[in-house]
Amino acid sequence: MIEGPKPAEYRVGIGTDIHRIVENRRLMLGGVYIPYPAGLLGHSDGDVALHAITDALLGAAGLGDIGTLFPDTDPQWKDADSKEFVYAVKETLEKKGWEVVNVDLTIHTEAPRLGPIKGQIRRCIAGLLGIDFTATNVKAKTNEGLGEIGAGEAMAATAIALLRKKYKRTL
Ligand code: MG
């Protein structure tokens, strides 16, 4: 009996994060520097969007979370460029035979308005993960003035990622 091709194995993961907005910090969002009078407080560069994506990827692969892999007590990650987290996780996924199918990101913030830079963030994510621009998406939402996000005290992000197992060809 001839067996058909093995069905593809898919895994989905979700990631969320929130960071306090403080003055006199560079605002890094989705790996892109945004000129703005305030930035995100954090042990690393505070890039809330890339942290959510990192957790979505780790979640999909069943590999834990960003805080365990890159602890904020480790001086190695002080002021770290969060692109390093995404790239390191992508490398780990590749070693384990996973490829990223797509990533969808929502950034929750009252300001700044992200319309003009969504494309830049998508290009950055696509480049980091080695996927097509069309396999990425960035949405921005205000919190309708509610809570800490609505008051402009914090910025949050939610991300979802889909992985596909790369099977080795046997023929
Ligand atoms: Mg974080």
Image (cartoon, grey):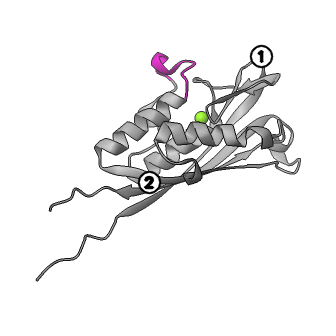
Where is residue 120 drawn, in percent x and y? Answer: 67, 37
Q: Residue furthest left?
A: 1
Please rate how many residues cluster around mark 1, counting C-alpha atoms within 10 Å: few if below 14, some from 14 to 19, many from 20.
Answer: few
What secondary structure do most residues of the magenta stretch adopt? loop
Ligand 1, image quadrant it occupies: top right
Mark 1 vs 2, N-terminal side? 1
- Mark-to-mark CA distance, 1 and 2: 35 Å
Please rate how many residues cluster around mark 2, counting C-alpha atoms within 10 Å: few if below 14, some from 14 to 19, many from 20.
Answer: many
- Left or right of 170? Residue 90 is right
Q: Name the amino acid, label 2.
A: Ala
Where is residue 77 drawn, in percent x and y? Answer: 50, 21
Magenta range: 73-82
Q: Which of these two is toward me, 31 or 21? A: 31
Where is residue 98 drawn, in percent x and y? Answer: 35, 51
Q: Quadrant of the C terminus?
A: bottom left
Q: Residue at horizontal 50%, vertical 36%?
A: 128
Badge count: 2
Relative height, residue 26 to residue 130 (above, below):
above
Q: Secondary structure at mark 2?
A: helix
> Residue at label 2?
60
Q: Residue at horizontal 39%, vertical 50%?
A: 99
